[in-house]
Image (spheres, rainbow, N blue to C red):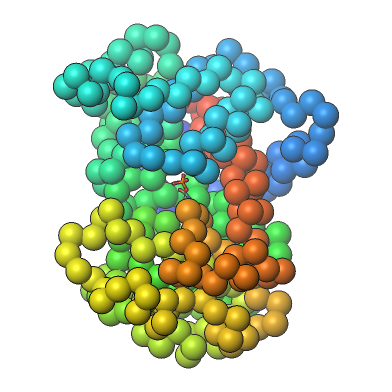
């Protein structure tokens, strides 16, 4: 089966999902991001790699971290960046997604960065846009958030190096989380020793083990000897019925407290893709504590998104299969 994300030479043309990408390609993204990571400390934070290119951010869902770091990443690559405010765009007058895309193509866009509440929206645009345009998925429904997963892998590699030695615990609303889905795919592709998911049964997908993880419904048991702890937010906006008795009860059973953190290895890192809900999934002292790398994840988002934009644009001259 052809992979829409790759061109004929196997280079990244779109970045829609971790699924279908091999370890070599994920490692190339991480290595490329490494080369951009030092730029934030430099006086001139720009390279001319995407000079003359036009990048359009299309965020149909709210975002703070992803949208801003994509804008900064594009600007540091010297691209022209336009972020469409969907609330004030012609979408609110009934314009279809495809018509919006056609109009942006007519303005000579080279890349679309897309966040949408519907799973598959970025794939749909990639399938229906002009051949020279690259599409990057900035989060689609419950399906995938691949750039978040890659910045998380980058942050883990900064602290832990060898994925083959790691036990990673992902805690929270696995069922509704596009971040968890992409993280699990990336961790498996990078040959992580053990991936654990910890959640109430109502917030785990059925047959979750088929994703290559071990499921726990006891947080303390699941945290034992973990190297990396990834906390997730309750995605209340995607819950169609009552999955939990209350947030208070959830924190009592699944919140990360100092006591529970002690079950993990002493040098375990604590991660969260954000936005965090203090006192719901994580104790404030841990979110701000010495083991937290939550804000490093945000900073790393710039370098990782620069890498993905640069790689996809480099192969944009070739047609994909
Ligand atoms: N992690 C993440 O996707 O955050 P935003 O919703 O703020 O972009």
Residue 58 placed where, x, y %?
Answer: 38, 29
The mark tally for this picture is 0
Residue 86 vs 228, above or below: the answer is above
Residue 21 vs 168, above or below: the answer is above
Q: Residue at x 26, y 35 (%)?
A: 124
Residue 145 placed where, x, y %?
Answer: 42, 49
- Between 34 and 95, the residue placed more toward the observer is 95
Residue 140 placed where, x, y %?
Answer: 33, 45
- Between 189 and 195, the residue placed more toward the observer is 195
Considering the image in quadrants, where does the C terminus appear?
top left
Residue 222 vs 195, above or below: the answer is below
151 sits left or right of 222 in the view: right
- Between 273 and 227, the residue placed more toward the observer is 273
Residue 69 vs 283, above or below: the answer is above
Q: Residue at x 38, y 40 (%)?
A: 62
Question: Going by the picture, which residue comes out furthest to the bottom?
Answer: 221
**Residue 10 in sight here:** no
Q: Residue at x 58, y 13 (%)?
A: 52
57 sits left or right of 229 in the view: left
**Residue 233 in sight here:** yes
Q: Residue at x 26, y 18 (%)?
A: 90
Residue 214 placed where, x, y %?
Answer: 40, 81
Among the 4 quarters of the image, the one containing residue 108: top left
């Amino acid at each position: 089966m052809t992979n829409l994300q790759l061109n004929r030479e196997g280079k990244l043309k779109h970045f829609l999902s971790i699924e279908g990408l091999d370890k070599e390609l994920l490692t190339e993204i991480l290595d490329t991001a490494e080369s951009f990571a030092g730029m934030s400390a430099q006086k001139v934070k720009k390279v001319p790699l995407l000079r003359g290119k036009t990048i359009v951010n299309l965020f149909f869902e709210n975002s703070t971290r992803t949208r801003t770091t994509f804008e900064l990443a594009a600007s540091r690559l010297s691209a022209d960046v336009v972020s469409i405010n969907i609330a004030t765009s012609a979408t609110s007058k009934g314009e279809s997604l495809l018509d919006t895309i056609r109009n942006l193509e007519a303005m000579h866009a080279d890349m679309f960065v897309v966040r949408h509440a519907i799973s598959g929206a970025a794939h749909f645009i990639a399938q229906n846009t002009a051949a020279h345009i690259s599409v990057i998925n900035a989060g689609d429904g419950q399906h995938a958030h691949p750039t978040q997963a890659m910045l998380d892998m980058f942050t883990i590699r900064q602290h832990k190096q060898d994925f083959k030695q790691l036990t990673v615990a992902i805690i929270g609303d696995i069922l509704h989380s596009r971040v968890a889905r992409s993280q699990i795919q990336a961790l498996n592709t990078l040959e992580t020793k053990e991936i654990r998911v910890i959640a109430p049964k109502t917030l785990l997908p059925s047959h979750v083990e088929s994703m290559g993880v071990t499921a726990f419904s006891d947080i303390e048991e699941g945290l034992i000897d973990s190297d990396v702890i990834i906390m997730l937010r309750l995605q209340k906006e995607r819950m169609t019925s009552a999955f939990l008795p209350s947030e208070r009860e959830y924190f009592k059973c699944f919140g990360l407290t100092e006591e529970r953190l002690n079950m993990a290895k002493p040098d375990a890192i604590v991660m969260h893709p954000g936005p965090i809900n203090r006192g719901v999934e994580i104790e404030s002292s841990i979110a701000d504590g010495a083991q937290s790398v939550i804000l490093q994840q945000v900073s790393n988002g710039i370098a990782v998104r620069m890498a993905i934009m640069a790689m996809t644009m480099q192969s944009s001259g070739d047609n994909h299969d």
